[in-house]
Image: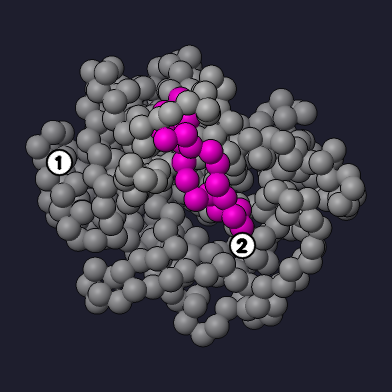
Amino acid sequence: MVVQPKFRNNIFMNAHPVGCAVEVRNQIDYVLSRKSIDGPKNVLVVGASTGYGLASRIVATFGAKAGTVGVAFEKEGSEKRTGTAGWYNMCAFDKEARDAGLLAESINGDAFSDEVKQQAIGLIKDKMKKVDLVVYSLASPVRTDPKSGEMYRSVLKPIGAPYTKETVDLMNGEVKEFTVEPALPGEVEATVKVMGGEDWALWIDALAAAGVLAEGVKTVAFSYVGPEVTQNIYRSGTVGKAKEHLERTARSLTEELASLHGNAFVSVNKALVTRSSAVIPVLPLYIALLFKVMKEKGIHEGCIEQIYRLFAERLYTGNEVPVDEEGRIRIDDLEMRHDVQQAVASLWTKVTEENFREIADVEGYRRDFFQIHGFDVDGVDYDADVAT
């Protein structure tokens, strides 16, 4: 079929298989253009199909020549409709890795379940024996507790009081004020259950019990802090409570891994265009302003640049991993530079419905948003029939 972009309410309803494959190849080419990394040899990536998880798998494979097992929950395409972008990304990655003679095994299933954990352990035992890096990069709105069977849904809400802010819808140009009501009783706990560190710990516990964690193993999960303008809806809200739990989990996992001389880290990354960030109020406008500033300063990075730097300049330098006072790796250091944040804050006060396309990088935001779904990718014929 001929696949044209379809989206509503900042959510894409389809994906382009060829565009996704080209974008995966572009990320691989970036890593191959950089210095090789003396890094991990056998890697498990939980949440491996998009964003930072996919980038982690690419950097491990093509930067360090590691074998990988990737876990994600994506929808396969059919003759009538496309699959998800993540499905096409995993298919493209597996082919590229195997063509390069490198181990790549993918599991499409619910990473929160005990069954998928055991399936991954079986693959590790069969193909790798042990893993020396576990990347946890799940971004799901729903989780079923494997022990109780109870389903939890995360919410993006402030805590204690409503949050009202004026922002711009970057897709239609409308300036509007929005209000998000505070979280109801139980919603904070539910969000922590979905997005906190509980499942990360269950993965490490299962891997340790199965004896498939190597001496000196590292494990890393991803977080975000962000600027003052996003605090009420993000870091001080329900999601922030989940991220705090994730960071506490890293500390407890480091204690648990002491017998293997292993470590658990949370990496605080830069704000980027993702399927998740596109639906967070305020964040799209902030990202578009941030892109404008960072591109002008020559310090803009996407997912693959961030993760290459995480591996090459933080995790695998041969020295102790540098962390902040909270024990977190900070690769959002360029975003949070004082001059960058000062420039973004100044632009924010000037935004109007008439000028936002000039003072924010709206086209860059839009292009990234389309490209993570395989659209607007250079070299792809979008009028051609493609197999879905």
Q: Quadrant of the N terminus?
A: top left
Residue sitting at x 72%, y 72% = 179
Q: Measure the alpha-carbon separation of dots 2 and 1.
A: 37 Å
Please tell me whether residue 6 belongs to the stretch shown in magenta. yes
Answer left or right for 73 relative to 233.
Answer: left
| Left or right: 236 in relation to 388 | right
Q: Is residue 373 left or right of residue 232?
A: left
Residue occupied by mark 1: 123
Could you say where residue 387 lies in the image, as x and y percent from the top left? 36, 32
What kind of element bears circle 1?
helix
Residue under circle 2? 234
Is 11 located above or below residue 20 in the figure?
Answer: below
Q: Amino acid at mark 2?
A: Tyr
Q: Residues within 10 Å of mark 2 (few under 14, many from 20)?
A: many
Instruction: Say what amino acid the circle numbered 1 marks.
Output: Leu
Q: Which residues are magenta?
A: 1-22
Dots 2 and 1: beta carbons under 8 Å?
no
In reply to whether residue 257 is colored magenta, the answer given is no
Counting from the top left corner in percent of width and height, residue 373 is at 50, 40
First reached walking from the N terminus: tag 2 or tag 1: 1
Q: Position of residue 240 (x, y in %)?
A: 55, 64
Q: Which mark is residue 187?
A: none
Q: Which residue lies most toward the bottom here?
A: 185
Q: Where does the C terminus fall, quadrant-wise?
A: top left
Q: Residue 145's x, y, as percent?
A: 29, 70
Residue under the image location 74 percent in, 58 percent down: 229
Q: Secondary structure at mark 2?
A: loop
Query: Residue shown at 83%/45% (left/top)?
Result: 356
Against 293, residue 14 (above or below) is below
Residue pictured at 26% horizontal, 47% vertical = 108
Along the viewing direction, whichever of 331 and 87 lies nearer the viewer: 87
